[in-house]
Image: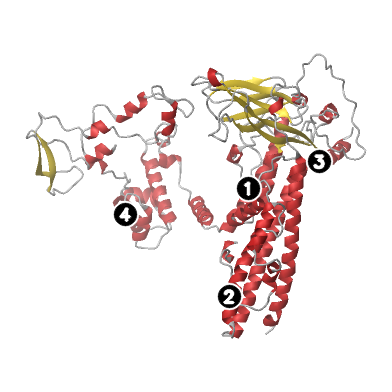
Amino acid sequence: MDAKDILGLPKTPLSITQEKKSRPQKDSQRKPDGISREVYALTGGVAPLMPSIDVSQLKRRPPSDEKITWQWLPFTSSARKDNLQLYHWVRVVNGVPPTGDYSFAKYNKSVDVIRYTDEEYEKHLTDPKWTKEETDQLFDLCERFDLRFIIIADRFPTPRTVEELKDRYYSVSRTILVARAPSPGEVAGHPLVKEPYNVTQEIERKRALSMVLSQTKHQERKDAEVLAEAKRIAESRMAARAAEEPDLPIASDIGPESAERAVGPGDTISPSNVQVPAPAAAPSTSLRVYLRTYALEQMVQAASSSAGLRTIKRVEQTLQDLEVNLKPKVPTKAVCAEHLELRKEILTLLNLQKQLQYKEAEGSSFRDGSYGDMPGSAKRSQRAADQDRTFVLDTISFGVIPGDRGVKREQKRKGPGRASETSSSPAGAHKRPRKMKASDL
Amino acid sequence: MGKSEDSEKKKKMKDVEISVPIVYGNAAFWLGKKASEYQSHKWTVYVRGATNEDLSVVVKRAVFQLHSSFNNPTRIVESAPFELTESGWGEFEIAITLFFHNYVCEKPLNLYHHLKLYPEDESGPMSTKKPVVVESYDEVVFTEPSESFLARVQNHPAVTFPRLPAGFTLPPPVPQDESKRKRGDTKDHPLSQWFLNFSEADELLQLAAARQQVQTHIAKLRRQISLTDGQNQPFKSL
């Protein structure tokens, strides 16, 4: 059903999809023949993402031997059971109105709800928790609303949960099917029989789903941390088992795709191919191999798992300010260890800054509360503005930086002693610096 | 050896690791006059020891997975130097899989390198004499190495040998017949003049300086915090 179908226009003789398929499969490394590589690169170097509409088809007018008029005509639809006479505009070709059923009638699908007889009810379907009346009502609603259980639950006269209604409906239908079938084998393939509705499982599943959806960011991060740890443990165990099977080498995919392993927290053995090794008989082969950059990345992630994205960005900005590579160019054991320690120290630094900010804000709010209007407050706000600037500079720069940059930074400040004045001056309404809000950290 | 001694040994060996510093990357020469549309550059992708030593003591073979538009995109190199030379025009990611000897490790290791042909500075002229070289330093770390592995590499220059736990002795190395094998190191490699230098000293220095600054700043903040605490105290006791 493509756009033309929905609009009710006749299909074109050569469909657009065929034109697309006839063009050979290209990828970004090979250019098509006929145009030079540079021109093709202008389009981004790949085949168009969306099938383009054939422009020549759009402008095509109907052939001139056909006379087209539009008429307001009555029509019937097989989807309606009453004999309501409706009218609509119809495209008439050469005086011949189109035949056939109303084109939207085919969309009138409904569900086959199985109805039981009273006899069948007596025989198979009685249940202590359900009266016949209720069951009848349930089935009426099911038929009326095409098994939309949320609506059915809403409209149900007595209060019942969606799971209860589903359970009753599916078990009744199942029983009827099985009862009516000449032999159990025949009906065993029916989806209602093959997969019975499990109420407790459904309730549990929905509860778990809502829990997952309502997790806080904090919880999410904790989970990600735990999963990463579990993955590492599982990998090392898998390596242990892999070492037992010399003819089944499994690549330790340490690279961009490594996140794709499906490992749950409790999952320790990859189900694919490794057999359980004989216990305590590990041969003396190495268990694991990894790239040091990969290990460093993991450790950096673990160290910053409790930090928000903004904090991580600030750590990286600080590293850049210190002229340290975000990823070490020469990752030896010593370099990686130092790098990790540095990152941790920067995190501590940022935390301390935040702490100091809070305490100062606290202090200033105490003073504001108890002093209100004070003479000389104009002077104070002037100093506050200055302190804003130097405070901001203080937190980003690091005092004397070796090299030229140090000279420039020093010149920006009002005076050499100013930096230390910033936070230690007690008096003065110290406004919160504009650049950093408490919510940033 | 009894089982208890074995597990004792394993425990001691837990923190022992062997690391092999490697450099992997590519060197690409523009073909200049001889360049055609599909073959504008001649490039070599390689994995070498960081100090140009022979890696074949550890690496059994290297498999370079090229772009699918190449014939036989899976190229296997069975001996050092582990490199592959091809010609083409496109830049793409090459997956390099290193397979190690049995006594080293059962599992292979994957490296990924983005082939670079064109210089960063697009406006500069392309030279046929000077190649575009991009290299990455990394270290392959083997945890809990086996005795045979340790014995085999004990004095090999390509390998960073760990300090062994106290009282641990290795069997003497099996003398290798050096004459038969051809040299696998890259010291006199034709491309060696273009190899980049990786010095950990510079990086360590930079890191040490940075840590110093951060630590000083931390101390200062700590002082300021306790000072502010002191100022806020009178208010709190109200």
Residue placed at 72% from the left, 40% from the top? A331
Query: What kind of element bears circle 3?
Result: helix
Q: Give the residue type that dot 4 points to.
A: Leu
Q: Give the residue type that dot 1 points to.
A: Leu
Query: What kind of element bears circle 4?
Result: helix
- Does the residue at mark 3 contact the one at mark 1 (Cβ under 8 Å)? no
Tell me which numbered mark, 1 or 4, is placed earlier along the sequence.
4
Query: Is residue A120 rendered to the left or right of residue B231?
Result: left
Residue placed at 41% from the left, 29% from the top? A39
Marks 1, 4: nearer the viewer: 1
Residue placed at 60% from the left, 41% from the top? A259
Q: Which chain letter matches label 1?
A: A
Q: Position of residue A7 (x, y in %)?
A: 23, 40
Query: What kind of element bears circle 1?
Result: helix
Marks 3, 4: nearer the viewer: 3
Question: Circle 1 sits on which residue?
Answer: A227
Query: How far is disc 3 from disc 4 in space, using C-alphas?
Result: 67 Å
Q: Give the residue type that dot 2 points to.
A: Gln
Return the residue nearer the eye: A72 or B71. Answer: B71
- Does the residue at mark 2 contact the one at mark 1 (Cβ under 8 Å)? no
Question: Circle 4 sits on which residue?
Answer: A141
Question: Circle 2 sits on which residue?
Answer: A382
Label 3 packing within 10 angstroms: few (<14), some (14-19), many (20+): few
On the image, which quarter does residue B228 sit in?
bottom right
Question: Circle 3 sits on which residue?
Answer: B14
Is residue B178 visible in this depiction of the protein? yes
Query: How far is disc 4 from disc 2 in space, using C-alphas?
Result: 73 Å
- Does the residue at mark 3 contact the one at mark 4 (Cβ under 8 Å)? no
